[in-house]
Amino acid sequence: MATYAIGDIQGCLREFDALLERLNFSSEDELWLAGDLINRGPDSLQLLRRVKDLSSQCQIVLGNHDLHFLAILFGGHKPSGKDTFADLLQAEDVFEIGHWLRKQKLVHQAKGHIMVHAGIPGFWSAVQALSYAAQVEAVIGQDAGDVMHAGAVDYKEFFAKMYGNEPPCWDEALGGMDRLRIITNYFTRMRYVDATCAMNFAEKGGLADTPSGFVPWFAQTPSEDRAEKILFGHWASLNGVTHSTAHVALDTGCVWGRYLTAYCLETEEVTRQAAY
Ligand SMILES: [Mn+2]
C-alpha cells in the first residue's frame, strides 16, 4: 500500500491517467490531491468525475481554482475569459459535483504529513492551522440541517464574498467574512509573506524573484518545530524546488507544458509524467 501526493492537475486528465498508470496505482493505494484540480487545462469536467469516482481512496484539499468554480456555481460570480471549465458549468451533474467538491478540506493532516494547496504561514502552529481550516470548512461544507448561529456566514454568502486581498494581515481578533477570507487566502493563494504576515499577491515568479521585504512562506521561521512535512502545490514557478526537506512543492506546471508530479509519502520517491 502506498500514498501518492499529486499537485495541480488543472484539468489535465490524460496526464493524470498516465501518471496513475505509471505508478501502478491500485485499489490498495491512497491518493492525496493538493488542489487546483481544474481550470486552465482541457478536461475539468471529466477530471472531476474521475476523481469523484476515486473519492473513497482520495484525500483532496481545495485550491484557488476549485474555489473559483464554487464561487461561480454558488456565489453568483461570472467565469473570466481565462477559465476553461464551460463544459463543467453546463454539465447535467454540475450541482452534484459542486456539492461534493465543497465538502473537501483546506488542510489535511495524516501519516506524518500536512497537505495544503498554497501553504501554512510560519506564525501558525499545525494545531492552529488545522483549527482555522476547520472554521472555513464548516462554512463551505455546510449541510442543510446544520444549525446556524445568528449572523453566521452560510456557504452561499462565503462564495459571494470570498474574493479580495483584504484584510492584509492575520489578527486573531478578526471575525466574520474577514477572518474566513484571510484564512482562505493563506491556505490557497499565498506565495511570499512579509514580516507583518501580509501576502504579496502580485509576484508569481520563483525563489530568485522574491520581492524586497518578503520571503517565500516556507522560508519563514516557524513558531514551533514542525513534526510534519508539508506538501503543497499552487506555485508552479518553483518547479518542485524549495531547498527544504520539510517542504515538498508538488506543482511542476503540467498545464504549462511541463510535468505532473507524484510524491510517494512512504518512499519519498518522485514520479513525473510529461505534459502531452
Ligand atoms: Mn493555485
Image (spheres, rainbow, N blue to C red):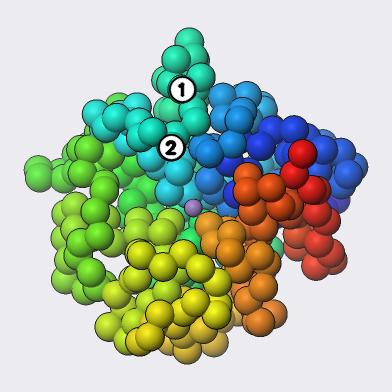
Question: Which one is in front, 59 or 21?
Answer: 21
Q: Amino acid at mark 2?
A: Lys
The residue positioned 63% from the left and 45% from the top of the image is 255
Q: In this figure, which residue is indicated by the disc labeled 2?
A: 82
Q: Is residue 255 above or below residue 70?
A: below
Q: What is the spatial separation of the Cα atoms under label 1 and label 2, in whole angstroms? A: 11 Å
Give the quarter of the image for residue 241: bottom right
User: Which sits in the foreground, 208 or 74?
Assistant: 208
Label 2, residues with CA under 10 Å away: few <14, some 14-19, many ≥20: few
Label at residue 86: 1
In this view of the protein, can residue 167 be seen by the observer? yes
Ligand 1 near label 1 (Cβ, under 8 Å)? no
Q: Residue at x 31, y 78 (%)?
A: 197
Eyeballing the image, is 89 above or below 71?
above
Q: How many marks?
A: 2
**Residue 271 image position (x, y, % from top left):** 83, 56
Vertical placement of residue 211 versus 258, above or below: below
User: Residue at the left extreme?
Assistant: 150
Q: Position of residue 208 (x, y in %)?
A: 55, 80
State whether residue 142 is above or below residue 167: above
Name the side, left or right, on which 4 lies relative to 143: right
